[in-house]
Image (cartoon, rainbow, N blue to C red):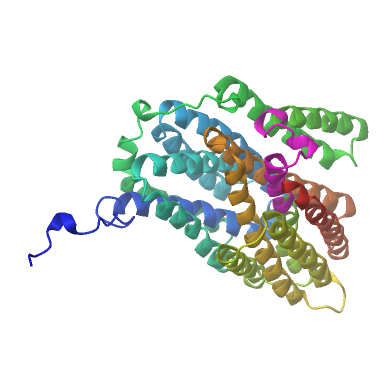
Amino acid sequence: MTAPKALDAPHKPAGILGPEYRTATLGILLVVTLIAFEGMSVGVVMPDIAKELDALDLYGLSFSAFLIASLFMNVVAGLWSDRRGYAVPFLAGVVLFAAGMALAGAAGSAEMFLLARAVQGLGGGASIVALYVMIARVYAMEVRPKAFAAVSAAWVVPAMVGPSVAGFVGEQWGWRYVFYGIVPLVVPALVMLVPALRMGSAADARPGTGPRSRPVEMTLAATATAGGAGLLLHGVDRLHVKGVEAGVETVVGLALLVYGLYRLLPPGALRFRRGLATTVLMRGFFSAAFFGVNAYIPLALQEVKSFDLKSAGIALTTGALGWSAGSFLQSRRDGEAYKRIRLGAGCVTVAILVCMLSVVPGMTGWISVPAWIVAGFGMGFGLTTISITAMRQSPVNEQGANSAALSVTDQLGSALSIGIGGALVNVIGHSSSQIATGFLVICALMAVISLSATLLAGRVR
């Protein structure tokens, strides 16, 4: 018998918190956490922002501005990272995000806050895409799944505590400090990522070759999609004030949106072609229905049921709990993808209908808590299935393009539903009873969208 040699020992891959990757991992997780915290927190303080800046008529557009800007930068930063390396788009994204947070905190008018939200969206969109490319280039193949799992987990904590923390900060020091408080935390994240950024040069760029990897065409498509969505929402928001002018703006915006989506999405997506095309669109249906209601729950609870900031934030927190449970259960169960997607959409539909009761006279607003747990569960169960199915249906050389397409439909669905919801609130009115009516109309519309997803889920096959 001889003692085993070191070479006989099984190879153990390095962990994401091992010496080789520790600082990069911590830096990445901090950046993702900051972006996630902003996204999960702003909804709680938006009612206070709207009151102070006299911007209730821009409530929906404040969310949509972030999402539309982020959608544009998802496409541009992805192309930029492939062709020139991820370092510059990441740094530009972080600087823009921090500048947008500072600008939002200092906003003295509704228009300045709207601009700040757009700047935040440009920064957040560029940073997230560049981070995914960074993981693919910096981490060894066997470590990447752990890194991506850690990034997903980094969204969970802000989703659970972000609304409550934002509510507390808003009540104690004011809504501006919800934005100001994030800016200083950007510095340590950048310091930790310096070694990884040095590796992100143009020499490591790997440009794609497919039709959706052409920089000029895709930049124009992204511009048309983002600009079209913005024009469409601005026009819809003004239809009740300037009918003809807003109508023209709406039609032009819709035409630009269709033109851009035709080039950004898989062939046949706008016609719900079976397979990948419909799978990608399902992401937009889920996001539109869920976030179209999610954005207005704090407004409804505070204005109709007199909830304080912290209490209104609890309803959003519970949605994150359900989302985590749905994602976990999905990973533990087998079944046909379309049935899982249909179940997820069904849960969102039922939850939205129950949530309508939260503004009915004589009913407690707290009914939104169990309702939003069910909605979150449906999102976690359905969206994870959609992402896995889309990658399974994608050729290897189109996985990147289809990942971007999923992000486009995700953000566009949210932006359009929240923006249209804001337009409905403006048309119906801003008194307590009118906001309750607006919330009911929004919920009914989003329930139709999620119900449509249950009916269309069979075309994923």
In the image, 207 versus 95, the foreground residue is 207
The quadrant in which the N terminus is found is: bottom left
Residue that protrudes farthest toward the left in the picture:
2
Residue 188 seen in render: no
Q: Position of residue 206 (x, y in %)?
A: 43, 28
Residue that protrudes farthest toward the front in the picture:
1
Q: Position of residue 150 (x, y in %)?
A: 44, 57
Q: Is residue 4 left or right of residue 87?
A: left
Q: Position of residue 235 (x, y in %)?
A: 82, 36
Magenta highlight: main SS: helix
Establish if 142 lies above or below 130: below
Q: Position of residue 299 (x, y in %)?
A: 74, 62
Which residue appears at 20% of the width and 59% of the height?
A: 9
- The magenta region covers 262-287
In the image, 168 versus 271, the foreground residue is 271
Q: Is residue 422 left or right of residue 63?
A: right
Establish if 182 lies above or below 130: below
Quadrant assignment, res 338: bottom right
In the image, 423 versus 7, the foreground residue is 7
In the image, 385 versus 428, the foreground residue is 385
Magenta-colored stretch includes residue 286: yes
Which residue appears at 70% of the width and 55% of the height?
A: 291
